[in-house]
Image (cartoon, rainbow, N blue to C red):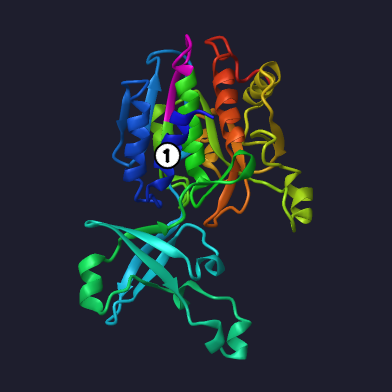
Amino acid sequence: MDKTALQFLGRLMDTISPSGFEEEAGRVWADEARTFTRDVWRDQHGNTYARLNQGGRPRVMLAGHVDEIGVQITHIDEQGFLYFAAIGGWDPQILQGQRIRLRTKKGRVLGVIGKKPVHLLKAEERDKVTKLEDLWIDIGARNAKQARAAVEIGDPGSIACDLAELLNGRYVSRAMDDKIGAFVVLEAARLLAQTKLTAEVVAVATVQEEVGLRGATTSAFALDPQVGIAVDVHFATDFPSMEVEKKRLGVIKLGRGPTITRGPNANPVLFNLLVAAAHKHKIPHQIVADPRGTGTDANEIQLTRAGVATALVSVPNRYMHSPSEMVSLDDAFSAAKLIAAAVGRITRATDFTAAL
């Protein structure tokens, strides 16, 4: 395991960066990018870029979104309890009792998400699904004045669940979706920086994916790439209660390598190039069939301007949109190696219309 890369991943995961509040994560990502390229910048939308071989052709965009799901404070009552809205797609049942870190102008504030104890619920209440409006955040404030001195309306927050290692090189974090993707594209760029490139390669830590693929839309328009590879997470189906999903999604296992998506959101030439690179370099991988748009940054990259030859490479993820999303770091490093190997094969003569 690369100790430097693992330390970078830990710093990235520790940032509080719900959609619209990614600047902290963007700074960590940019600082790491500057260890191997000077060509690093950030746009006014919040996307962060790291470029290799400016002026090379074709231009290849590597995108992983750096935002995570989280919460935003909407109201502080007279007793000092905080009410919030979800940023991105939360299951309210998961939020109950979680510790949460709020990012404020004065620093981080720790709180807990409260709910009426089960002992005090009426029988009919126990059978109801908890809604976000039934929850609040308790930071220990005695009253509204004390709470408002610590927290402001609009402050963002994330579940207080840091990166942790389990058995067999598996790691959990609240933000694998998709800081692991932002990590992979930068690690792929780090590998490519050690090679002689024909293409211009721009890795991008995109923003606001969880609220509408927005950062991919603006960054792809700005870059005008001819080729784009998005990196996200994909549902692992190797745990209990997933038998039905296996028929729909396939058998996707942690530790068996990244997934490569095949379908209308993937250019067939680029798909074949990725698969060929995986076989040549003996990189483990899994094929995923998706007959629609994928709901990832790949959608927006593909549809930019007159169209971009696009692919989607994903890291299998258990327990998505929970405080303990689980991935295998072997899969993440394999994804970086796969992307670097495939991009290294792209030349000015590569014809991405050949299979159309």
User: Mark 1 Cα within 10 Å, few/some/many (few <14, many 20+)?
Assistant: many
Q: Give percent across and percent down for residue 327.
A: 59, 43
In the rendered view, tell whether residue 340 sits above or below residue 11.
above
Give the quadrant of the N terminus: top right
Q: Residue at x 48, y 11 (%)?
A: 195
Q: Give percent across and percent down for residue 18.
A: 40, 52
Q: Quadrant of residue 50?
A: top left
Q: Quadrant of residue 202?
A: top left
What residue would you read off at disc 1?
Answer: 206
Q: Residue furthest bottom?
A: 122
Q: Residue at x 47, y 30 (%)?
A: 3
Q: Residue at x 27, y 82 (%)?
A: 78
Q: Secondary structure at mark 1?
A: strand
Q: How many marks?
A: 1
Q: Give percent across and percent down for residue 303.
A: 52, 36
Q: Give percent across and percent down for residue 338.
A: 60, 24
Which of these two is toward me, 328 or 259?
Answer: 328
In the rendered view, tell whether residue 31 sits above or below residue 68.
above
Q: Is residue 199 magenta?
A: yes
Give the quadrant of the C terminus: top right
In the rendered view, tell whether residue 348 sits above or below residue 79.
above
Q: Is residue 124 magenta?
A: no
Which of these two is toward me, 199 or 292?
Answer: 199
Q: Is residue 191 left or right of residue 151?
A: right
Q: Residue furthest front?
A: 167
For the question of whether residue 310 can be seen, the reply is no
The amino acid at mark 1 is: Thr
Which of these two is toward me, 355 or 45?
Answer: 45
Point out the stretch of residues depicted in magenta: 192-203
